[in-house]
Amino acid sequence: MGEDNAKHLIQVLEEHYDLSKDWHGTKYCGLSLDWDYKKREVHLSMPGYVEKALARFKHANARKVQDQPHKHANPVYGATVQYAKEAATSQLLDKNGKRYIQQVVGTFLFYGRAVDGTMLPALSAIASSQAAPTQATMEKIELFLDYAASHPDAIVTYRASKMILALHSDASYLSKPKARSRAGGHLFLSENEEDQANNGAVLNTAQIIKAVMSSAAEAELGAMFINAREGVPCRKTLQEMGHKQPRTPMQIDNSTAVGVANKNIQPRRMKAMDMRFHWLRDREAQKQFKFYWRPGKLNLADYWTKHHCAVHHKKMRSKFLTPRNVIDTLKASFKRKPTTN
């Protein structure tokens, strides 16, 4: 609450630890913070992290500019039957190859969760096969590292808000091997309004739903369950920080899933979904969440549910990440000396 309190904290810590002080607040847990007090924004980045990681894995330069971290499935227009993709049969990697895959995933997973959430779907897909990686997995790693080399030093921006938690939830049905589906989520802080303005992500979820979903509605409910479960501790943390939370709005693009969660649809033959929708109904009854429908094109969580083409990645990066020239302009403004008339 003031400089005296900060000095008291430093004095106590110095009795037990060796520490350094940064009164400008530019570093935190490996993150660089650039404050724009006029616009009430803060820009988070990790300069040099990707460069050091690529040097460690001896992949300093991209073979070509890569705008997608993972290959996408090419659509087959006009097909009367949609066939599941056949399982990969490429050669298994040796012990060193396996360790290499795991090291890349672990190194960039920290970076992806901290700053560059666009990497998470690709890392999730690669991690699902890292226990028994094949030559095909290594090819995915090479493409991913090309993407990292093409887009280093990502920046995520948080703007001042009313600190109201908001969620977007989505799922892609039967998009993963072994008839599994993927859940995606975008959690951010915004205003207490019906149409919440986007902000830097507090958390992005991109994970494979372990159970086999029997319908698209069940996959959406599974994703809602995963994201709401992540939202509960976020709500609790915000409340303990003094930010009172109304019902947390969760946006979904499947009307059946919303109807089930809001008790507007009474399921009869959906016993496999019992735990998920009853838990969501319980949280809705406790007035913790508000589930509502909006079209899929307005659902930001869709980005983390599947592998998109390069054009889509280029289009969406600006919605979640900040161009480098924003920080360069901000730093340049600090260096300018004020002029006098």
Image (tube, rainbow, N blue to C red):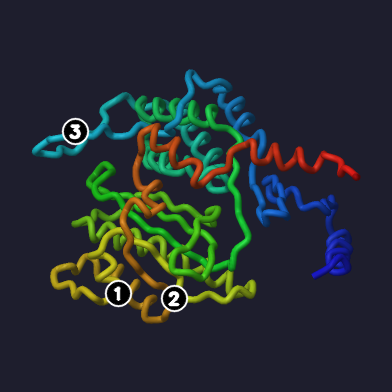
Residue at the bottom extreme?
A: 286
Q: Is residue 19 visible?
A: no
The image shows residue 102, relative to residue 265, as above or below, that is above
The image shows residue 166, relative to residue 71, as above or below, that is below
Type of amino acid at the residue the image marks with label 3: Val
Mark 2–mark 1 CB contact (< 8 Å): no
* Observer-nearest of 229 and 190: 190
Q: Residue at x 52, y 35 (%)?
A: 103
Type of amino acid at the residue the image marks with label 2: Gln
- Residue hosting label 2: 288
Where is residue 30? Give x, y as percent. 68, 45
Reading the chain from its start, which is encountered first: label 2 or label 1?
1
Label 2 vs label 1: CA separation? 13 Å
Reading the chain from its start, which is encountered first: label 3 or label 1?
3
Mark 3: few, some, or many residues within 10 Å (few <14, many ≥20)?
Answer: few
Q: Secondary structure at mark 3?
A: loop
User: Residue 259 is drawn in which quadrant?
Assistant: bottom left
User: Residue 293 is drawn in which quadrant?
Assistant: bottom left
**Which quarter shows the N terminus?**
bottom right
- Residue hosting label 3: 76
Judge left or right: residue 265 versus residue 303. Answer: left
* Observer-nearest of 224 and 90: 224
Where is residue 206? Give x, y as percent. 41, 49
Residue at the front extreme?
A: 341
Q: Residue at x 67, y 46 (%)?
A: 31
Q: Residue at x 42, y 37 (%)?
A: 313
Label 3 vs label 1: CA separation? 36 Å
The image shows residue 132, relative to residue 4, as above or below, that is above
Reading the chain from its start, which is encountered first: label 2 or label 3?
3
Mark 1: few, some, or many residues within 10 Å (few <14, many ≥20)?
Answer: some
